[in-house]
């Protein structure tokens, strides 16, 4: 039994991440909106992509086509394996955000939107109306332990939901390390190393999914509408069918680097 992370080993045979299909570039309305409002659509990440790529190259990662596709996503925005059914689904669509259940949730949504604008994940407010090619999906304040909330975008609601554009089979195959893998690794370590000291540490990535930028042709589907104001959500969201798959592709390479470099 290998003590090497299954997540890291998965990267050796992982398939290349997709770019927007050719059919997306037939959506003239969306392309015109993006090209005329470049101030709204931006691909940005705090990750030092060139350093990340250089480390993988220097370490000789055995699947360069995969890691280069991840770097392409970080540079130009990720595409979530979507078929937007251009010509079948409506070009522009709005799903209304329900009224928050109470004043606390209402204020949380206000504060969270302001925060997302401040850090650059949301664009500034561009007015009360959607532009051609845009979709908006509802947002919710979901309670967490300790009386706090989390902002979640519902990509599964309505006749033209964004999650309905992504086939489950296309985003299957995520390999996650778990406690059982850790236990097996610890047992094998003790068998080989005896009582030698071992330090175990845990790191948490704050706002992990949000560090993954989305392609502008997907950003235009991620409009957030609240209190008569519209914002472009530029980042990977909590609530997207492909969100875990996108972050996993990046994080699996980080784990590979941690083991082999």
Image (cartoon, grey):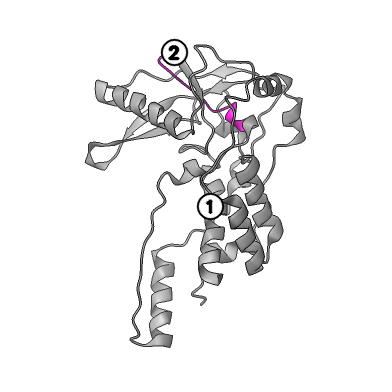
| Of labels 1 and 2, the one closer to you | 2
The answer to which image quadrant residue 207 occupies is: top left
Question: Horizontally, is 221 left or right of 124 in the view?
Answer: right
Question: Horizontally, is 195 left or right of 205 in the view?
Answer: left
Mark 1 secondary-structure assignment: helix
Q: From the viewer's perspective, is residue 51 above or below residue 257?
A: above
Q: Is residue 227 magenta?
A: yes
* Other-residue count near label 1 (Cα within 10 Å), few / some / many at <14 / 14–19 / ≥20: some
* Other-residue count near label 2 (Cα within 10 Å), few / some / many at <14 / 14–19 / ≥20: few
Q: Is residue 181 magenta?
A: no
Q: Which residues are magenta?
A: 218-228
Q: Residue at x 68, y 54 (%)?
A: 68
Q: Residue at x 60, y 15 (%)?
A: 131
Of 151 and 233, the residue lying toward us:
233
Residue assigned mark 1: 248
Of 59 and 95, the residue lying toward us:
59
Residue assigned mark 2: 228
Q: From the viewer's perspective, is residue 214 above or below residue 65?
A: above
Of 240 and 53, the residue lying toward us:
53
Q: Earlier in the sequence, mark 1 or mark 2?
A: 2
Mark 2 secondary-structure assignment: loop
For the question of whether residue 110 can be seen, the reply is yes
Q: From the viewer's perspective, is residue 26 above or below residue 238?
A: above
Of 114 and 51, the residue lying toward us:
51
Q: Position of residue 47 (x, y in %)?
A: 53, 49
The answer to which image quadrant residue 144 occupies is: top left
């Amino acid at each position: 039994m290998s003590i090497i992370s299954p997540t890291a080993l998965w990267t050796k045979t992982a398939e290349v991440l997709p770019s927007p299909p050719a059919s997306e570039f037939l959506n003239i309305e969306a392309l015109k909106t993006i090209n005329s409002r470049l101030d709204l659509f931006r691909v940005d990440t705090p990750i030092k992509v060139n350093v990340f790529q250089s480390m993988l190259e220097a370490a000789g990662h055995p699947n360069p086509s995969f890691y280069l596709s991840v770097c392409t996503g970080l540079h130009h925005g990720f595409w979530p394996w979507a078929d937007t059914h251009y010509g079948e689904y409506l070009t522009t669509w709005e799903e209304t955000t329900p009224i928050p259940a109470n004043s606390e949730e209402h204020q949380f949504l206000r504060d969270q939107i302001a925060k997302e604008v401040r850090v650059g994940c949301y664009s500034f407010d561009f007015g009360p109306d959607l532009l051609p090619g845009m979709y908006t999906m509802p947002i919710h304040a979901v309670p967490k332990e300790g009386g706090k909330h989390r902002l979640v975008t519902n990509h599964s609601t309505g006749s033209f939901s964004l999650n309905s554009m992504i086939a489950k089979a296309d985003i299957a195959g995520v390999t996650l390390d778990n406690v059982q893998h850790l236990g097996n690794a610890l047992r094998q370590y003790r068998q080989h190393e005896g009582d030698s000291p071992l330090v175990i540490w845990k790191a948490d990535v704050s706002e992990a999914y949000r560090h993954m930028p989305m392609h502008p042709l997907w950003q235009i589907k991620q409009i957030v509408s609240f209190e008569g104001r519209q914002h472009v959500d530029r980042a990977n969201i909590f609530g997207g069918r492909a969100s875990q798959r996108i972050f996993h592709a990046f994080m699996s390479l980080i784990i590979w680097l941690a083991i082999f470099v």
